[in-house]
Image (cartoon, helix red, strand yellow):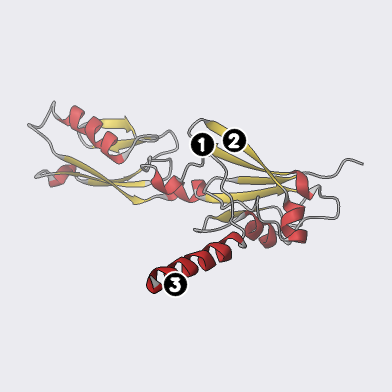
Amino acid sequence: MRVSLILLISMALVACANSGSKEVIQPEDAVSMSSKIYKIGVGDSLSISVWRNPELTVVVPVRPDGNISVPLIGDIAAAGLEPEGLADQIRAELVKYIKNPQVTVVVTAATSSAFLHRVRVTGAVNSPTSLEYSQGMTVMDIVLVTGGVTEFADANGAKLYRTTQSGVKVYPIRLEDILEKGDISTNYQLQPGDIVTVPERLF
């Protein structure tokens, strides 16, 4: 009985402590880039291996037209495909020349992902910028990196633009409340590709 009472008191104290803390709220429909299967992009470098056919094993760049060149096959579209999907297409072409080809595609340099895995701030901030995404980065983090908002900013009119499974979503950010009042209810955790815009006040 005594142990049970102690446990109940402990749980009550934890609940009270948690209720006093503010939680960073996430926008709905968020799409984590890390949860997506990587798609090949222009500028990426690919290693294409064909088992027991070393003469067909090559490392090739994805050209600006989105194509790569593969021995025996010639040009084949790569941009926008997942590595396994490209391997399937190469396999389907090589079967004309080789019996049961086993093809592996590995992205050895994901150059295109460096552009996709960035977050950006535009508008009435002191230094509009594009930054490499870091895990746990928030709206306040990226705005502080820009040197804060200008004197003409409508900080509570700021918006977050995010690509989701159902298209681009726009979420209001009360940036003045975050910076001046410590209200972090709209201090969203960012995702790769997010864009934060801060408009100017209308005079």
Place of residue 102 in the rendered image (x, y in percent of width and height, measured from the top left) = 14, 39
- Circle nearer the N terminus (3, 2): 3
Place of residue 69 in the rendered image (x, y in percent of width and height, measured from the top left) = 30, 37
Mark 3–mark 2 CB contact (< 8 Å) = no
- The residue to which callout 1 is attached is 164
Q: Secondary structure at mark 3?
A: helix
Which of 36 and 49 lies nearest the eye of the viewer? 36
Place of residue 129 in the rendered image (x, y in percent of width and height, measured from the top left) = 66, 54
Which of 29 and 88 lies nearest the eye of the viewer? 29
- The residue at 88%/40% (across/down) is 202
Amino acid type shown at disc 2: Lys
Mark 1–mark 3 CB contact (< 8 Å) = no
In three-dimensional space, the C-alpha distance between marks 3 and 2, rounded to whole angstroms, equals: 47 Å
Q: Is residue 22 left or right of residue 9?
A: right
Mark 2–mark 1 CB contact (< 8 Å) = yes
Which label is found at residue 169? 2
Place of residue 160 in the rendered image (x, y in percent of width and height, measured from the top left) = 64, 43
Badge 2 crowding class, 10 Å Cα cut-off, few under 14, some 14 to 19, many 20 or more, is some
In three-dimensional space, the C-alpha distance between marks 1 and 3, rounded to whole angstroms, equals: 46 Å
